[in-house]
């Protein structure tokens, strides 16, 4: 598969396209204000976009807490799923984390989102708990996943059977 997209830091001008992805992917999409606050908080956050032919096809937002990376959000345009965009965004985040000396990563994911869970497992994430009714609108539980980034960075992601 030939990668045709590039990754760059998200900018204020990207908000409209990020909101489209939010609305398409999440039952509780973030608001314009939340996204702007996240993108502009460059001290503890890093938001990147994958763009192709002058349009954003995916994005990733992470937060840094001490020596940990927290994945806040990741999404692609529904019609672009399965092309490896999320994988590219995660690879970029891991490379940045390594430069920063980040050793561990965590996230929450809806228990029904098997496609995302499979992706995270390939990066060495494993469940450590459940947040009951984490998603207010759907009352869905979230899996809490953790990964040791040094191991994940030095070894290829495990394949799932």
Image (spheres, helix red, strand yellow):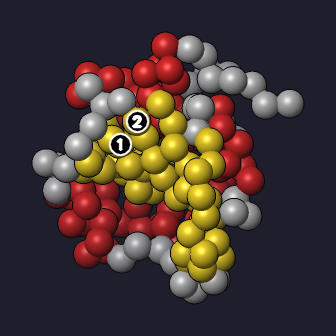
Residue 86 at x, y = what percent? Answer: 55, 41
The residue depicted at 16 percent of the width and 56 percent of the height is 41
Please tell me whether residue 133 is drawn above or below residue 126 in the rendered image. Answer: below
The residue depicted at 60 percent of the width and 79 percent of the height is 133
Q: Nearer the viewer, residue 35 or 44?
A: 44
Please tell me whether residue 44 is drawn above or below residue 33 in the rendered image. Answer: above
Residue 62 at x, y = what percent? Answer: 35, 48
Quick one: SS at disc 1? Answer: strand
The residue depicted at 67 percent of the width and 48 percent of the height is 117
Quarter placement of the N terminus: top right
Please tell me whether residue 122 is drawn above or below residue 107 in the rendered image. Answer: above
Quick one: SS at disc 2? Answer: strand
Select label 2 or label 1 by which is in front. 2
Q: Is residue 57 visible?
A: no
Q: Nearer the viewer, residue 129 or 5?
A: 129
Q: Is residue 37 left or right of residue 130?
A: left
In this figure, what is the number of numbered marks? 2
Give the CA distance from mark 2 to mark 1.
6 Å
Q: Nearer the viewer, residue 34 or 139?
A: 139
Residue 27 at x, y = what percent? Answer: 58, 76
**What is the crowding at mark 2: few (fewer than 14 residues within 10 Å), some, or many (at least 20)?**
some
The residue at which mark 1 appears reads as 69
Q: Residue furthest left?
A: 43
**What is the crowding at mark 1: few (fewer than 14 residues within 10 Å), some, or many (at least 20)?**
many
Q: Is residue 102 left or right of residue 157?
A: left
The residue depicted at 52 percent of the width and 24 percent of the height is 152
The residue at which mark 2 appears reads as 104
Q: Which mark is residue 39?
A: none
Q: Is residue 148 visible?
A: yes
Specify which label sits upstream in the sequence, 2 or 1: 1
Disc 2 to disc 1: CB gap under 8 Å:
yes
Residue 70 at x, y = what percent? Answer: 38, 49
């Amino acid at each position: 598969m030939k990668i045709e997209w590039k990754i760059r830091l998200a900018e204020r001008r990207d908000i409209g396209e990020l909101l489209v992805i939010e609305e398409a992917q999440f039952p509780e999409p973030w608001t314009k204000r939340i996204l702007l606050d996240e993108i502009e908080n460059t001290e503890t956050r890093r938001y990147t976009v994958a763009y192709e032919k002058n349009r954003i096809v995916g994005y990733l937002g992470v937060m840094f807490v001490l020596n940990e990376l927290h994945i806040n959000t990741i999404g692609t345009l529904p019609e672009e799923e399965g092309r490896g965009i999320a994988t590219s965004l995660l690879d970029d985040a891991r490379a940045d984390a390594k430069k920063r000396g980040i050793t561990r990563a965590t996230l929450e994911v809806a228990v029904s989102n098997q496609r995302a869970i499979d992706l995270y497992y390939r990066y060495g994430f494993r469940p450590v708990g459940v947040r009951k009714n984490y998603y207010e609108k759907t009352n869905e539980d979230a899996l809490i996943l953790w990964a040791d980034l040094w191991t994940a960075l030095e070894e290829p992601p495990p394949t799932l059977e």
